[in-house]
Amino acid sequence: MEVGQMQRQWVEYTKSLFIEDFLDGQFLQLQQLQDENNPDFVVEVVSLFFEDSERLLNDLTLALDQKGGVDFKKVDAHIHQLKGSSSRCLRCLKQVKQE
């Protein structure tokens, strides 16, 4: 398959994801963050965020499912970590966008 054809397919696929509301303006902002010096930056940041979020959500689930009662200190700590990693990820992406 030639490059031009693959690019057209990518554009059509992306359009369909916007139409179906799977993607929004944030996707376009993320695309703008990458440059030739660090082409995988966005993938790396978002991948790390998802890995960390998955771990935190699993820990939160365990804290909420305790048979002896909910340990609200653990729940609070996990929520605080999730909030912090979310804001750090967003701050990092905004900083790169400004550069």
Image: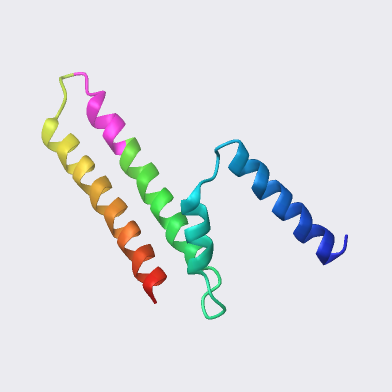
Q: Is 20 on the left or on the right of 25, as rendered?
A: right
Residue 65 placed where, x, y %?
26, 23
Picture quarter with the C terminus: bottom left
Depth check: give the residue in front, 40 or 77: 40
Residue at 61% x, 39% y is 19
The quarter of the displayed image where residue 20 is located: top right
Residue 25 placed where, x, y %?
49, 51
Picture quarter with the N terminus: bottom right
Residue at 34% x, 57% y is 90
Farthest residue in the left direction? 73
Judge whether 81 appears above or below 30 on screen.
Answer: above
Q: Specify how the rendered protein is coloured.
A: rainbow
Residue 85 placed where, x, y %?
29, 53
Depth check: give the residue in front, 70 or 47: 47
Judge whether 11 appears above or below 71 on screen.
Answer: below
Depth check: give the residue in front, 7 or 37: 7
Q: How many marks?
A: 0
Residue 26 placed where, x, y %?
46, 53
Residue at 42% x, 57% y is 48
Farthest residue in the right direction? 1
Q: Is 87 on the left or on the right of 71, as rendered?
A: right
Magenta stretch bounds: 59-67
The overriding secondary structure of the stretch rendered in magenta is helix
Judge whether 31 appears above or below 76 on screen.
Answer: below
Farthest residue in the bottom direction? 37
Residue at 41% x, 69% y is 97
Q: Is 88 on the left or on the right of 22, as rendered?
A: left
Is residue 17 highlighted in magenta? no
Judge whether 71 appears above or below 88 on screen.
Answer: above
